[in-house]
Amino acid sequence: MYGADLGVSLAFLLTIASALLCVWYGAINWNKDASSEVDINLKTWANDEDKIDEAL
């Protein structure tokens, strides 16, 4: 009888731990790719601006 109780308790605790791990991972990686995209756009804009200034 105690084996079934341990299994249910373990499943419950692992489910809660899994949910917390997902929240932690999401918070760490929130908009991680978006910042690199902004940097690329900023560098492209700066290069285009330099080319326009040289043409003037």
Image (cartoon, rainbow, N blue to C red):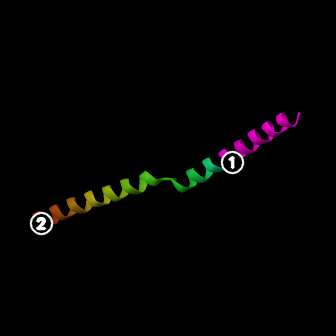
Residue shown at 74% from the left, 39% from the top:
11
Q: Which residues are magenta?
A: 1-19
Asked which quadrant contains residue 50, the reply is bottom left
As drawn, 32 above or below 1: below
Q: Position of residue 33 (x, y in %)?
A: 42, 51
Please say if 4 is above or below 39.
above
| Among the two numbered marks 2 and 1 on one chain, the one whose residue lies closer to the N terminus | 1
Q: Nearer the viewer, residue 48 or 7?
A: 7
Query: Element under label 2?
Result: helix
Report x, y in % for residue 34: 42, 53
> Which residue is identified by label 2?
54
Q: Main secondary structure of the magenta part?
A: helix
Which image quadrant is residue 18 in? top right
The kind of residue tagged 1 is Ala
Q: In which quadrant will I find the N terminus?
A: top right
How far, Cα to Cα, is label 2 from label 1? Answer: 58 Å
Residue 56 in view here? no
Circle 1 residue:
17
